[in-house]
């Protein structure tokens, strides 16, 4: 009798989407390896009987050590890989700190390449049709990104583009690559994101409170689903015999997909209301329009 299919999930610290997904995949019958930089933050996974692996997705040495550990545990193969580890950095584009943006892309984009290529030998040895699922975001869809989340949106757009290339490049080897487009989900994401405030001289300070609420992820009309629901749906999706190339789960994920099909600008009014730009425009008008900015 064949054993359980094996899968490794990155970014599984307690309270994260990775933790919820590891638990859901475990319940769905997979043999799951949950990874994080700090093993002490994998208490939920450990309590469920999930095997835990220490791995820093930004370190080639750490990833190689994790590969060696999984290789010993499975006998040399791996049936699935979920590149879930990621982070956030929210601020207006004009205020982006380039060094912090580099760190964001290292985590959200280049880690996908590092982890995938290092685990690839194990995935190639799967005789069950290996899968790779990259957790991107609805924010990375063209035209669907929330204002003042620009650096994060760009990193997720890059991750999505890499995923689509991998899908074609690895298809000849029997590896199915899935673009996991995640919408709004309740998790520790914003709490762990780089904390940002508008500079004292920002041109956006007329609407400081509204815009900083957007930067913190508190946007009116944004419908979040709980992490457990999201994880169960994703686990069911990628556990299919022939999983789809694109999986859209989480609050407003499907809506984001539709936005990409609309003419440019169609959703500007909605994004203005969600992000505080409507407040900024109103206060600019009340205080004399652009002349107020020009006088500064």
Image: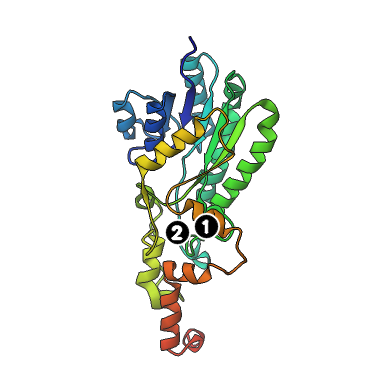
Q: Is residue 127 left or right of residue 221?
A: right
Is residue 56 visible in the rendered image? The answer is: no
**Residue 25 in picture, x, y percent from top left:** 42, 30
**Residue under the point 44% across and 75% down:** 278
**Residue under the point 58% across and 26% down:** 130
Say if 52 sits above or below 228 in the image. Answer: above
Q: Do tag 1 and tag 2 residues touch (Cβ < 8 Å)? A: yes
**Residue 101 in picture, x, y percent from top left:** 52, 54
Q: What residue did someone put label 2 on? A: 90
**Residue 260 in picture, x, y percent from top left:** 59, 58
In what element is the residue under mark 2?
Answer: loop
User: Residue 244's mark?
Assistant: none
Is residue 134 visible in the rendered image? The answer is: yes
Q: In this view, does 20 lie to the left or right of 247?
A: left
Q: What residue did someone put label 1 on? A: 151
In what element is the residue under mark 1?
Answer: helix
Q: In this view, does 161 lie to the left or right of 184?
A: right
**Residue under the point 54% across and 49% down:** 105
Say if 284 sits above or below 123 in the image. Answer: below
Nearer to the camera, 111 or 126: 126
**Residue 258 in picture, x, y percent from top left:** 56, 56
Residue 286 lies in what quarter of the image? bottom left
Q: Which residue lies furthest to the top in this view?
A: 1
First in residue order: circle 1 vs circle 2: 2
**Residue under the point 42% across and 71% down:** 276
In three-dimensional space, the C-alpha distance between marks 1 and 2, rounded to whole angstroms, equals 7 Å
């Amino acid at each position: 009798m064949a054993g359980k299919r094996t899968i490794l999930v990155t970014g599984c610290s307690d309270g994260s989407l990775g933790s919820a997904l590891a638990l859901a995949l475990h319940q769905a019958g997979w043999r799951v390896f949950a990874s994080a930089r700090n093993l002490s933050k994998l208490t939920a996974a450990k309590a469920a009987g999930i095997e835990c692996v220490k791995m820093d997705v930004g370190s080639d040495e750490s990833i190689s050590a994790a590969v060696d550990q999984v290789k010993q545990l499975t006998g040399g193969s791996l049936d699935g890989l979920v590149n879930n580890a990621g982070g956030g950095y929210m601020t207006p584009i004009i205020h982006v700190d380039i060094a912090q943006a580099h760190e964001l892309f290292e985590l959200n984009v280049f880690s996908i390449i590092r982890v995938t290529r290092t685990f690839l030998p194990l995935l190639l040895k799967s005789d069950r049709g290996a899968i790779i699922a990259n957790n991107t975001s609805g924010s990375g869809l063209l035209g669907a990104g929330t204002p003042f989340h620009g650096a994060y949106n760009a990193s997720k757009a890059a991750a999505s583009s890499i995923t689509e290339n991998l899908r074609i490049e690895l298809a000849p080897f029997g590896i199915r690559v899935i673009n996991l487009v995640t919408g709004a989900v309740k998790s520790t994401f914003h709490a762990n994101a780089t904390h940002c405030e508008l500079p004292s001289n920002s041109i956006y300070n007329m609407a400081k409170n509204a815009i900083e609420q957007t930067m913190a992820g508190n946007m009116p009309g944004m419908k979040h689903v709980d992490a457990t629901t999201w994880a169960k749906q994703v686990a069911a999706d990628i556990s299919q015999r022939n999983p789809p190339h694109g999986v859209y789960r989480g609050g407003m994920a499907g809506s984001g997909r539709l936005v990409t099909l609309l003419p440019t600008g169609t959703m500007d009014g909605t994004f203005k209301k969600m992000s505080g730009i409507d407040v900024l425009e109103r206060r600019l008008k009340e205080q004399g329009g652009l002349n107020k900015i020009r006088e500064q």
